C-alpha cells in the first residue's frame, strides 16, 4: 500500500522493498514559520578530554558532576517531584448524541480488546516480562497513580520512610496479597528478588524494559523482615516512587520467587506470568491472543469482567472495522479514526497522556567513560563517516554534524505533520522532552520549518550535492512508521537527500540501541518524551551512559549526564526546573533529537458493553485498570 493512502496532503510514495528508497511524486507542504538562516552560533567546542561541547545559551544552572557518595549531613527536606499535571491540552472527541454504537457480540461477562501487538507473555523480569502485564491487569507495582494531586501513592507498598540523609528508602508492604494459581502470599523476598532480577545494576543479563531505569536510581534491594524492604539509592531521585516502580510510567511488576526456586528460569520463560493483579492468565499466545480470568476475592479489587481477551490485530483498518461491527468491545485505533468512531457512538478514553515523537540522531556517543562508574565505554555506533554524527575529539567535525542535524530539523513541517498524521488531535513539538504546551516552555527553543536555510547549511557543512541517510520507524506502531515515511519524504523532496526508510518490529531493533550500536536516526519518544511530564523531573537519562545495559536513544552526552545527576540529587523543586532549562538549552543548540509532534494516547470502547471505566492517569497507555470496568446492565 502506498503511504499516499495515509497522507493525502503529504503525497510521498514508498517504493517496495524492506529498505525502500523514498521517491516524491508531488507535495503540498504548506507555509513556513519565520526562517532562521543558520542555527545558533556555536561556542568553542570542548577538548577531547571534556568530550562534548557547551550549549549556546548558558544553562540557568550549569550542569556539573555530582559525587556518587551519599551526603554525610542531612540535607534540606527534599521537595517531592511534581505531581502529574492535568492534561488540559488534550482534545478528546465525545460521542454524538442520538447515534448508537453496534450491539456487542462478546459473551456476557467477557470483554474483547483489539490491540496492535500481543507481546510474548514472559513470566520472569530478566527476560522482559512484568511491564505490559501491569497495564493489562495481571501484575501490580509497589506504587500507583490516581486522579488528584498525588502521583506515586502506595499500592503493593503500604507505607515508606526515606532516610534523613537520602541514602535509602524503607518500604513496608501490604499483607495478605496472594500470587495467582495458589503460589502463596507475597512477601519482601518476592519484591526484593523481582527488583534485583530486573535491574541492570544487580543483574547485568536483564533485558527488562526498566533494566536501565532502575540501575541509576537503586543499589541492591534487601529484605528487612517478612513485609519490609530496604531500597538504597545510588543517588536520591525525586521520582523514585513515580517512575520504574509505579504504574504511572514504566512499571516493574512483582513476580513470585517461590516459582523461580521451585520451577526455575526456563519454566518461567515458557509459562504464563505468576503475579498479583486482579486478572490471572488462562492462556497467552504471543502475536495472537491473551485470555485472562478474574481473580476472585482479590486483595484490592475483584473485577466485574470475568474474562478479558486481548486480541492482536496489527492492521488498524481491521481494528476499526471490528469494533464498528461489534466484534471488539475496546480498540486502540489510529488517531485518524477517533473522530469517526466518536461520531458513531463510541466513547473515548485513555490515561490523559500524550506521546512525543522525536527523531533521535543515533550514533552521537560523546561520552568516553561511564558517568557513574568511570569505566571505559565501547562506542560501536560512533560512525564518524555519517554526516549527522560528530567526532567529539574534533571540534570542526562536531560543528559540521551540528549544522547537518539543524538542517534536518528545519527540513520538515511539524505543523503539517501534526495536522495530517493525527487528524488534528496532536500538536507540533520542537525538541525532545520539552513540550511547547507546558507553561515552562520558552520561545527560544522553537525550531522553524525552513528548507531553503536547511539546504544552505547542508552545503556549508560540505555536502552541496546532499548525502544518503536512513530513518527507522517501527512497523508495529503505525504512527511511528508513518512519521518516518513522511519525514523521509520531506528530506528527499525539500532537501534533495537520498533517503531510505527502515520499518520492522521494535523488538528486533531494540538490541541495537541497548548495545549502543545503531547509527541511524529513528522515531521514538525516548522514554521521557511524554506529556504532561512534570518539568522538574530529572530528564534525558536515555541520552547518557547512565542507562547502559538498558534502553537508549542511541545518544550519550556528558553534559546531559551531569545535569541528570545534579537534578536527581537536588532537593529543591525550583532548582531542578532551572537545571532542566539548561538541558533544554543544550538540546536546542546541539539538536540531538528534534521533535515532530505530540499524539494523545487514546482508546475507544462500546458503551453498549461498558457503562463506565475509571482509567488511572499515567504517562503510559492508553490501557490500564481493566478491573475498574463497569459493564452495561
Image: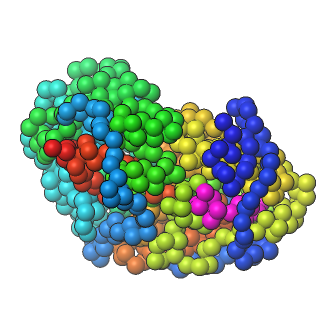
Residue in the picture at 59% in, 61% down? 419
Towards the viewer: 558 or 631: 631
Residue in the picture at 15% in, 57% down? 159
**Residue 271 seen:** yes
Asked whether, in this view, residue 527 is left or right of residue 238, the answer is: right
Q: Is residue 416 magenta?
A: yes
Q: Position of residue 596 (x, y in %)?
A: 61, 60
**Residue 387 seen:** no
Q: Position of residue 52 (x, y in %)?
A: 66, 63
Q: Find the residue positioned furthest to the front.
A: 98
In the image, residue 208 above or below residue 74: above
In the image, residue 516 above or below residue 306: below
What range is drawn magenta here? Answer: 404-420
Towards the viewer: 220 or 178: 178
In the image, residue 89 above or below residue 214: below
Residue in the picture at 82% in, 67% down? 452
For residue 264, what is the image quadrant?
top left
Q: Position of residue 396 (x, y in %)?
A: 81, 63
Towards the viewer: 553 or 323: 323
Dominant SS type (magenta): helix
Towards the viewer: 468 or 557: 468
Asked whether, in this view, residue 314 is left or right of residue 238, the answer is: right
Q: Is residue 49 magenta?
A: no
Q: Find the residue positioned furthest to the right.
A: 465
Q: Position of residue 5 (x, y in %)?
A: 65, 44
Image quarter of the C terminus: top left
For residue 470, what is the image quadrant?
top right
Q: How many marks?
A: 0
Residue in the picture at 39% in, 50% down? 344
Amino acid at each position: 500500500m502506498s503511504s499516499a493512502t495515509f497522507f493525502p496532503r503529504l503525497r510521498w510514495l514508498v517504493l517496495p522493498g524492506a529498505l525502500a528508497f523514498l521517491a516524491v511524486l508531488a507535495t503540498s507542504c504548506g507555509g513556513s514559520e519565520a526562517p532562521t538562516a543558520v542555527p545558533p552560533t556555536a561556542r568553542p567546542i570542548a577538548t577531547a578530554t571534556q568530550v562534548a561541547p557547551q550549549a549556546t545559551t548558558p544553562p540557568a544552572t550549569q550542569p556539573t558532576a555530582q559525587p556518587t557518595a551519599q551526603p554525610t549531613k542531612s540535607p534540606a527536606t527534599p521537595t517531592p517531584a511534581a505531581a502529574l499535571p492535568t492534561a488540559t491540552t488534550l482534545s478528546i472527541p465525545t460521542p454524538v448524541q442520538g447515534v448508537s454504537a453496534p450491539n456487542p457480540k462478546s459473551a456476557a461477562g467477557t470483554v474483547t480488546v483489539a490491540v496492535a501487538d500481543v507481546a510474548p507473555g514472559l513470566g520472569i523480569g530478566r527476560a522482559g516480562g512484568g511491564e505490559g502485564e501491569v497495564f493489562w491487569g495481571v501484575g501490580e507495582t509497589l506504587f500507583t497513580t490516581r486522579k488528584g494531586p498525588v502521583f506515586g501513592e502506595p499500592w503493593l507498598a503500604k507505607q515508606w520512610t526515606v532516610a534523613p540523609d537520602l541514602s535509602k528508602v524503607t518500604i513496608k508492604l501490604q499483607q495478605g496479597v496472594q500470587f495467582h494459581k495458589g503460589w502463596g502470599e507475597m512477601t519482601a523476598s518476592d519484591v526484593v528478588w523481582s527488583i534485583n532480577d530486573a535491574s541492570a545494576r544487580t543483574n547485568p543479563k536483564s533485558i527488562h524494559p526498566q533494566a536501565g531505569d532502575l540501575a541509576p536510581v537503586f543499589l541492591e534491594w534487601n529484605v528487612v523482615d517478612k513485609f519490609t524492604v530496604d531500597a538504597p539509592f545510588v543517588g536520591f531521585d525525586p521520582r523514585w516512587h513515580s517512575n520504574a516502580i509505579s504504574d504511572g510510567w514504566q512499571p516493574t511488576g512483582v513476580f513470585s520467587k517461590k516459582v523461580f526456586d521451585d520451577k526455575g528460569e526456563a519454566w518461567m520463560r515458557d509459562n504464563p506470568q505468576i503475579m498479583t493483579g486482579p486478572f490471572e492468565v488462562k492462556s497467552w499466545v504471543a502475536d495472537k491472543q491473551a485470555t485472562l480470568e478474574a481473580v476472585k476475592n482479590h486483595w484490592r479489587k475483584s473485577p466485574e469482567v470475568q474474562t478479558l481477551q486481548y486480541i492482536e490485530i496489527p492492521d488498524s483498518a481491521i481494528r476499526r472495522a471490528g469494533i464498528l461491527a461489534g466484534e471488539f468491545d475496546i480498540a486502540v485505533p489510529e488517531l485518524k479514526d477517533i473522530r469517526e468512531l466518536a461520531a458513531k457512538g463510541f466513547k473515548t478514553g485513555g490515561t490523559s497522556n500524550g506521546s512525543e515523537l522525536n527523531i533521535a540522531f543515533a550514533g552521537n556517543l560523546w561520552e568516553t567513560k561511564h558517568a557513574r562508574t568511570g569505566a571505559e565505554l565501547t562506542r560501536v555506533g560512533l560512525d564518524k563517516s555519517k554526516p549527522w554524527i560528530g567526532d567529539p575529539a574534533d571540534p570542526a567535525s562536531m560543528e559540521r554534524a551540528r549544522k547537518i542535524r539543524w538542517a534536518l530539523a528545519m527540513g520538515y513541517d511539524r505543523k503539517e505533520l501534526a495536522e495530517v498524521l493525527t487528524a488534528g488531535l496532536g500538536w507540533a513539538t520542537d525538541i525532545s522532552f520539552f513540550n511547547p504546551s507546558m507553561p515552562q516552555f520558552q520561545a527560544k527553543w522553537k525550531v522553524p520549518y525552513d528548507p531553503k536555510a536547511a539546504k544552505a547549511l547542508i552545503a556549508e557543512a560540505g555536502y552541496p550535492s546532499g548525502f544518503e541517510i536512513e530513518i527507522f520507524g517501527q512497523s508495529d506502531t503505525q504512527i511511528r512508521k508513518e512519521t518516518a515515511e513522511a519525514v523521509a519524504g520531506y528530506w528527499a523532496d525539500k532537501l534533495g537527500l537520498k533517503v531510505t526508510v527502515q520499518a520492522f518490529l521494535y523488538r528486533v531493533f531494540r538490541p541495537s540501541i541497548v548495545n549502543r550500536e545503531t547509527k541511524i536516526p529513528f522515531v521514538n519518544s525516548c522514554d521521557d518524551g511524554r506529556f504532561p511530564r512534570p518539568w522538574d523531573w530529572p530528564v534525558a537519562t536515555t541520552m547518557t551512559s547512565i542507562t547502559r545495559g538498558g534502553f537508549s536513544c542511541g545518544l550519550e552526552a556528558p553534559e546531559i549526564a551531569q545535569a541528570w545527576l545534579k537534578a536527581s540529587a537536588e532537593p529543591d523543586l525550583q532548582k531542578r526546573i532551572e537545571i532542566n532549562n539548561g538541558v533544554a538549552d543544550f538540546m536546542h543548540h546541539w539538536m540531538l533529537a528534534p521533535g515532530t509532534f505530540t499524539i494523545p494516547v487514546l482508546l475507544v470502547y462500546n458503551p453498549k458493553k461498558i457503562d463506565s471505566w475509571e482509567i488511572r492517569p499515567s504517562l503510559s497507555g492508553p490501557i490500564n485498570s481493566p478491573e475498574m470496568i463497569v459493564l452495561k446492565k
